[in-house]
Amino acid sequence: MSRRSLLALVVTFFAVAVAGVGFAGRTSGDTSVYGLVNANGGRAPTFQTQDNMKGVRRVGLGRYCLLAAVAFDRRPVGQLTTDIDLSGGRRGVAVLQSTSKLCTPQELAVVTFQFAAGGRLVLSNQISFIGDPEG
């Protein structure tokens, strides 16, 4: 698959993921909700820092489920970015997967990719990221 085709696939995947859900609203309070997830190089992921997050788990290669400690009206959407320092200098991408069957409806599903040789994107357990399940 060419780099352009893969980029188009990722952009389309992200657009479908965002378009497939409405904005999530919290049912109580105005507390912040976010988590800086340390991918831990393939070991169990952990929160490097977090606020109002209950848990993070890896459910497959480059696939994570984040659970907030607050309740949402609908399946959460989110904002994501990668952390190059916690990723050991590796460049990568983190995207939302709104219809993941690997996560519960209360969890934010995240997929991480690493840039490989030739600029290809491959699924990776090496990319750490910041997730904000409020959207």
Image: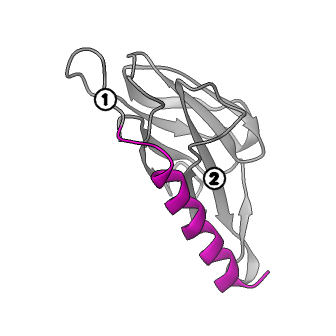
Residue 104 x, y percent position in the rendering = 63, 25
Residue type at numbered disc 1 = Gly
Indicate which disc, 1 or 2, sits on the residue closer to the N terminus: 1
Residue 63 x, y percent position in the rendering = 69, 43
User: Does the magenta portion include 14?
Assistant: yes
Specify the principal SS of the magenta part: helix
Magenta residue span: 1-23
Name the residue carrying label 2.
112
Helix, strand or loop status at disc 2: strand
Name the residue carrying label 1.
25
> Is residue 55 shown above or below 38?
above
Q: In the image, what residue occupies the spot 68% across and 50% down?
A: 126
| Side of 46 where 73 appears, left or right | left
Residue 83 x, y percent position in the rendering = 48, 52
Q: In the image, what residue occupies the spot 59% across and 47% down?
A: 97
49 or 32, which is in the foreground?
A: 32
- On residue 94, which mark appears? none
User: Does the magenta portion include 16?
Assistant: yes
Q: In the image, what residue occupies the spot 61% across and 52% down?
A: 127
At label 2, counting other C-alpha atoms closer than 10 Å, the crowd grade (few under 14, some 14-19, many 20 or more) is many
Marks 1, 2: nearer the viewer: 1
